[in-house]
Structure formats: structure tokens, C-alpha cells
Image (cartoon, rainbow, N blue to C red):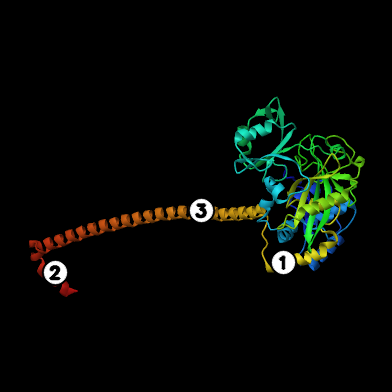
Amino acid sequence: MNTQAKIETTKDLSIYQKLGMKTKSNQFTNWYNAGLLDNIDENFAKEIQDYWLEKYNAEADPALHMAYMNLTGKKDVRLIPERIMRREIMPVFNDYNMSTFYGDKNLYDTVIAPSRSVETVLRNINGAYFDNDHNSVDAKDAETILLNSETALIIKPSKTNNGTGIKKIIIQDKQIYLDDKPVTIKDLEEIYLENFIVQKAIEQHPNLAAPHPASVNTIRMVTFRWKNEIRYLLAFARFGSNNDVRDNGSVDISPRIGISDSGEFFKLGLSQNGQTFTHHPTTGFCFADLEPIPNFDEFKQFVIDSHKSILHLNLVSWDIIVGVDGKPIFLEANFAGTTSFYQLVTQRPFFGDLTDEVLEHVSKELKIKEPVLMLRHRQQIEEKNARKKQKELDKSKELAKQLKQKNKKLRKKRRDLKQKVEDQEKEISKIKKEHSEEVKQLKNKYTNIVNSKSYKYTKPLRKIAKWLK
């Protein structure tokens, strides 16, 4: 399982960022922690950008180039960064609307039809069972087929990659055992639901088994259809670790060994997290003791021939077993992969001497059509867009909440002001009433005074006083 690596937050990564490296990526972190980015060549970084601007009209993250330089001591501007490879180059060459069809392990023998492959015992397709000859069988017969097996079996989902769900089945005393526990066909259905395949466990060549006998160790080989010809590009061996039956059970730490075009194994192993090995971390096997594959040209022709049946995908990664007789056995076909790691472990650019013309072709294609990304990348983009929309929605909700609270305060303030106005109006009305009453009283008092006898008797005096003024 991949784990998110971390860098100490106190580390100054500005030199890397200045050169255009994505320092938050998991790959950068792995290479940095493994010491593969200890030495940085700024002049080489400029050469990298000059090459990519000239050949592809884009800048490239130079982290892979620097890791490659630290690992091999060689400089090569033609190495292809992971993001450019996955998001731009591979979708030009591979129709990823078809990858699910070609990648269904239950259809390998009919769609790809390799000349030698692992023998299938039972298939489950959309909940229905089929035997090795594609005859439909019920669940009871399916269980009988498993119980009649005389060898150990391997069960795995038929529509997933990277070792997901692969387990060994043992038949003993007419009982099916999975993880050392007795199970029935119904139990397998509960675990795998549907779309799974059961195959005979293969006996591998002792040379490939030696570093880690517990796992079926494979050779990952890559072919490329280019200008009407299927070409072999590169290969490396994949070994399991920690006694896991899978060769990629611990993908971050399991060692991989590059293989030369003549079938010789490199003496230095590399894990996906950037750790290097001279010996296997679980068994202590010395990788320098691996013997070359004497008939490696046969392996290359085997994957080239197998690729002829895959018409919609021009880049294919093959998982090939070296049989006990030293001949190739088809296990799986993959249409993606961590291609930056491919280039590190095989110590070569992905497309080799074809790189310049491949980049030119892809650059032209991207100008005239929108390539279809891998399903998981489409899902990642959709999830990213969904998260963005959710973030905007949450922001809108928060703003609405704030406006609602503000509106509530304004309504309260309006009510308070209205109440204050009403109170003031009442007060004014009261004052008016009191004033009116007071005026009325004064009028009455005046009237009383005017109508009084004293007022009448003193009238002459008031006139005399007026004249005297």
C-alpha cells in the first residue's frame, strides 16, 4: 500500500522550488528522503527546460532528472516526468475508454489469447460462474471445481490491478482454505462479491524465485506500437517482500531490478520510495547472484506478439512469469504504471531514442484533440471539481448564514427603532394632551377672570392706566 511520505517542515526547499520542482508531491518527498535529490545541478536544470521548451513547448518538473543523476551519475534531458506522461502522453496513445475491456482478467484468454498463460480454473463474471472452457456452471459445481483441484490456487479480483485482493487458496481434505481458514464458495462470494478469477498457482523458475521464494516474482515489460510497428521498450524484475505472496504487496519497499536488453539483471535494486538495495531486505539474497535470462529475445518477442491483439492501446505494460522451463508465461496486462519509476529502475528514458519524435507527435495531437484520460484520473478531476464546488457551496452557505444573522440583527434593530418611535410618539401624544389640558385650563381661568365682577369693576382703572402709558 502506498503511504504518504513527509519531509521535516524545517527543511528549506526553496532551491528545489526555484528550479520548478513540485515539492509537495509524494515522489519528490520519497526521492528527497532517500537522498536522490542531495546533489542539484542548476546548469543541468536549465538544459532540461531548454530541451522541453524546444521539443514540447512546455517546462518540465526536473525532480526525476535530478533523482536519475544522483542514482546513476548520468544526465539525460529526455526523461519524461510522471504528470506529463500520465495526463498528456499516455492518453494520446491509449484509448482509456477501452482499458477496462482489455484489462478484464476473465477475458484475457479470449481477447489477448497469449500463447502461454497461467491456467484458469474458475471465473466469476457479474455473479455468474464459468469454468476454464467458458461453460456456465452453478455455485455448487463451482465449489466442486475448486475442491477437485490438485494444486494450490490463486484468487483475485478480475477488474483491478496492483495486487489488490490477491490471496492463495489451499485445498486440503476436501476443504477450501483461505488465509488458513476453511471457507465455502458462499464465503468467497461475500469477500469478493463478483468479478473474480481463480487460477492455478504457477511454479516459477528457481532463478527468479531465489530472492524471495514466497512470492511469484514477475518481469514487468513495456511495449509500444509506433509507426505500424510494435516495439519493446524496457523491462525490470519485481520481487515480493515480507513473505507476501504478491510481488507488489509492499510496493513502496519491495525491490525492483532493472534488466538489460540482453537479459542481464542490474546489481542494484530500487524500491518505489527510492531506497536502493544490493541484497533483498527480507531474505538477504545478493542481487549480483541473479543469473541472466539466456533467451531474453524470446521474452521480448512474446510480449510483442501478445500486443498484436490489443488494438486500442498502444502502450502496454506486461507482467510476465519466468516458467520453470525458463520460458515466458503471461500473467497480466496493464495500461498505466509509475513511469517515472520505470525510468529510474531501468536507467533509461521511457522512449529512448524515439523520445524527440514522440514528443513532437504528442504536441501536435494535443493541439487538435482532447485525449481521454485514465478513468482514475477522470475520477480525480471530477472529485477535485466536486470538492471545489463543495467548497464554493460551503462558502455560499457560510455567507448566507452570516447574512441571515446580520438580517436577524437588522430586524431586531428595526423592531427596537420602531418601538422607540412608538414610545416617542406616545410621549409626544401625552405631552400634547397635557399641553392641551393646560391651555384649556388657562382659557377657562381667563374666561372666569373676564367674567368676574372684580374684572368689570376695575375696567375704568385699566383704561386710565393705558392712557397714562
Q: Do the residues labelled 3 and 2 touch (CB within 8 Å)?
A: no
Report the disc number at residue 136. none
Question: Dividing the picture into quarters, in which one does residue 150 lie?
Answer: top right
Mark 2 surroundings: few (<14), some (14-19) or many (≥20) residues within 10 A = few
In this view, 224 is above or below 146: below
Q: Which of marks 3 and 1 is nearer the N terminus?
A: 1
In front of the other: 365 or 310: 310
- Give the residue at mark 1: 365
**Can you give x and y, in whole percent of width and height, for residue 118 in the image?**
76, 42
Can residue 337 be seen here? yes
Foreground mark, 1 or 2, reads: 1
> Is residue 56 in sight in this rendering?
no
Q: Quadrant of the C terminus?
A: bottom left
The crowd level at tag 3 (other Cα within 10 Å; few <14, some 14-19, many 20+) is: few
Q: Is residue 47 above or below residue 323?
A: below
Residue 238 sits in which quadrant? Answer: top right
Q: Callout 2, which amino acid?
A: Arg
Question: Would you name the residue on which mark 3 appears?
Answer: 397
